[in-house]
């Protein structure tokens, strides 16, 4: 099931890239340069590896990013992304849900061609997760909830296509690794400890340059 979903996701982004290039290529290029900034609205899909990936299904994520250029090729980035996830297998684990948010501050390196700007973001980040489980315990239903935080880093690689003077539409892929303090219960296991987890995301971004 997971392999098929990942194959579909890759095909979807390949088609979207082709569509963006075909339709918006005639845009006018204006890069984020020194003393300029951009506001980005972003959304896509986010999933986890390891134990969290076994427990929770991939789901939609959305957020925003702010970029301030301190040279023509380097900028300061603040990035926020939020997602909500449900259990991947209700029969095995009971009723699980988790919210996941990241706030990151780091550096962007970019280079502008005539109509396309590839870039790479490297950012330390803080993560915040809210976990809840409801599962049968004999004749009762137990509820276990946990708020946890963590610190780590992420890398984002992508490109923006200029669709107008001062506006871009782009795609990005992201991988993050977080050290955390999660110690939670499910219906099958009352002691789940996660010290480190990895998440990944595919993101569509709309940016306005000021």
Image (tube, rainbow, N blue to C red):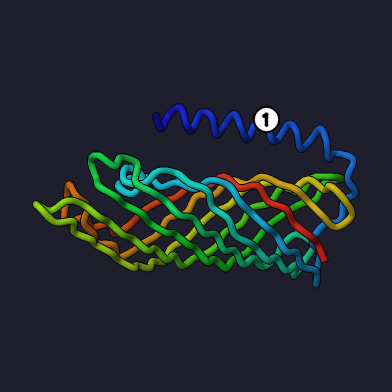
Q: Is residue 21 left or right of residue 54?
A: right
Which residue is found at the position 19% from the left and 59% from the top?
Answer: 142
Which residue is found at the position 64% from the left and 65% from the top?
Answer: 77
Q: Is residue 169 left or right of residue 187?
A: right
Q: Give the residue at the far front of this rendering.
A: 139
Which residue is found at the position 72% from the left and 54% from the top?
Answer: 110
Q: Whole-percent x and y of residue 31?
A: 82, 57
Q: Whole-percent x and y of residue 151?
A: 41, 66
Q: Residues within 10 Å of mark 1 (few under 14, many from 20)?
A: few
Q: Secondary structure at mark 1?
A: helix
Front residue of 154/43: it is 43
Residue 71, located in which quarter of the rendered image?
A: bottom right
Q: Whole-percent x and y of residue 128?
A: 42, 66
Q: Whole-percent x and y of residue 95?
A: 29, 50
Q: Quadrant of the N terminus?
A: top left
- Name the residue that disc number 1 marks: 15
Image vertical order of residue 2 relative to residue 189, above or below? above
Which residue is found at the position 41% from the left and 32% from the top?
Answer: 2
Q: Quadrant of the C terminus?
A: bottom right
Front residue of 151/92: it is 92
């Amino acid at each position: 099931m997971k392999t098929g979903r990942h194959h579909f996701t890759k095909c979807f982004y390949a088609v979207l890239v082709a569509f963006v290039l075909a339709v918006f290529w005639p845009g006018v290029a204006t890069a984020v340069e020194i003393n300029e900034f951009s506001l980005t609205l972003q959304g896509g899909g986010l999933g986890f590896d390891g134990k969290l990936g076994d427990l929770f299904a991939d789901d939609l994520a959305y957020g925003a990013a702010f970029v301030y250029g301190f040279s023509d090729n380097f900028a300061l980035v603040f990035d926020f992304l939020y997602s909500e996830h449900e259990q991947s297998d209700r029969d095995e684990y009971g009723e699980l849900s988790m919210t996941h948010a990241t706030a990151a501050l780091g550096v962007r390196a970019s280079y502008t061609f005539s109509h396309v700007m590839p870039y790479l973001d490297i950012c330390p980040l803080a993560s915040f997760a809210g976990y809840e489980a409801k599962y049968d315990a004999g004749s009762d239903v137990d509820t276990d909830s946990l708020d946890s935080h963590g610190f780590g880093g992420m890398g984002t690689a992508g490109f923006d296509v200029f669709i107008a003077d001062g506006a871009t539409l782009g795609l990005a892929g992201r991988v993050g690794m977080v050290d955390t303090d999660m110690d939670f219960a499910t219906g099958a296991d009352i002691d789940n400890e996660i010290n480190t987890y990895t998440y990944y995301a595919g993101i569509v971004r709309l940016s306005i340059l000021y």
